[in-house]
Amino acid sequence: MAALPPDLNSLPTTRAGIARLAIARLVDVGVPIAPLLKDIGLTEEMLAARNPRVPVQGQIALLDRAATALRDDFLGFTLAQDFEPRALGLLFYVMASSQTLGDALQRIARYSSITNEALVFSVGTGRELSIGLTYAGLPRHSDRHQLEFCIFGTIRLCRILTGTSLVPQSVSIAHHRSGDTSAMSRFAGTTVEFGADIDAIVLPADAHARALVNADPYLNDLMLDYCEAALAPRATNASPLRVSVENAIAPLLPHGKVRADVIARQLGMSERTFMRRLADEGLSFSEILQQMRRDLAERYLSHSSLHVSKIAWLLGFQDVSAFSHAFKHWTGLAPSQMRTAGVQT
């Protein structure tokens, strides 16, 4: 994996809390950290700083590498089950001191960018209480472990804050997973749906009014002031057009509905305007689609339990032969050869 671009100002950043949890696991089992970090353009000094800010892409790359080194394909979920909530800093204390769970979740929706600029939390109320996650300035399909940490970490936080064994009505995750995910469903208390249209947790409507065990209105007022002060200097990261296109494509791929007019409509513009804006940035719709398919294909092929026919479907190909032909055009290798090469390395 290539090092990250040097211009960090153009990238959404994170305080690297999840990355540091992963580093601690690697250290515990004796995995050398410096070479792994150098590979992805990070250093031990960057992560050890009191208030580090590193590119979110670096955290995602680190989690992928750590999962491989630890032989834990569910690393984000693993870390979510036993992390120290107070390590979230301001974000935890402003949530914990709120009056109700609904208030606490509104706090995370407003202030989550203090710790991670790429992940956008939203809260909806009505017949149920929903927590949605979307991405700004980062392609959704590049992430897996960080997202799973956030989903299951949020469920755990809701239980800690209310002092109850709160069970979601549903949990949906946009990326696909092969293998046994029953441990995730047991933790959630409901079946976790992978390959969904959205990343979301839906709680019962009455969860909104549940009192928090450490509610403290005086502390909460103080924490709100601190959070507003921390939020003020953070510039809003407008999602680049390419990222917006990729994030619109991702959920449509398996359904064979990825067309320029469909994506343009989702982005609120005419197809003509859409194509012109892509051209203005030196992009083409077909290039974005094919590069995204290639990136996902290589990721899916790294999972031996995911059959090639399933991968073809996930990428929107009508059959295995069409996928194999495209993959050989991209890489010079058949999917089976790429999978074998991955196992050997």
Image (cartoon, rainbow, N blue to C red):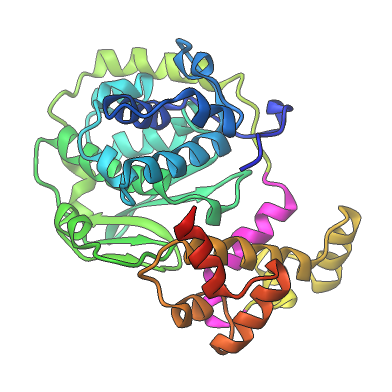
**Quadrant in the rendering for residue 17:** top left
* Left or right side of 141 for 90: left
User: Does residue 177 sit above or below 228 in this rendering?
Assistant: below
Quadrant of the drawing holding the N terminus: top right
Q: Which of 26 and 129 is in front in this view?
A: 26
Going 26% across and 43% down the picture, which residue do you hit?
78
**Quadrant in the rendering for residue 244:** bottom right
Q: What residue range appears in magenta?
A: 239-257
* Left or right side of 136 for 310: left
User: Does residue 244 sit above or below 180 in this rendering?
Assistant: above
**Tag count in the figure?**
0
List x then y, in percent, for residue 337: 55, 71
Going 71% across and 33% down the picture, which residue do you hit?
5
| Residue furthest to the front | 344
**Quadrant in the rendering for residue 25:** top left
Whether residue 86 is visible to the viewer of this picture, yes or no, is yes
List x then y, in percent, for residue 122: 44, 47
Whether residue 211 is visible to the viewer of this picture, yes or no, is no
User: Does residue 206 sit above or below 112 in this rendering?
Assistant: below
Q: Which of 313 and 116 is in front in this view?
A: 313
- Residue 127 in the magenta stretch? The answer is no
List x then y, in percent, for residue 163: 10, 35
User: Does residue 84 sit above or below 106 in this rendering?
Assistant: above
List x then y, in percent, for residue 336: 52, 74
Going 50% across and 81% down the picture, which residue do you hit?
313
Q: Which of 53 and 115 is in front in this view?
A: 53
Magenta stretch: helix, strand or loop mostly: helix
- Residue 251 in the magenta stretch? The answer is yes
Q: Nearer the viewer, residue 183 or 327?
A: 327
Going 27% across and 13% down the picture, which residue do you hit?
219
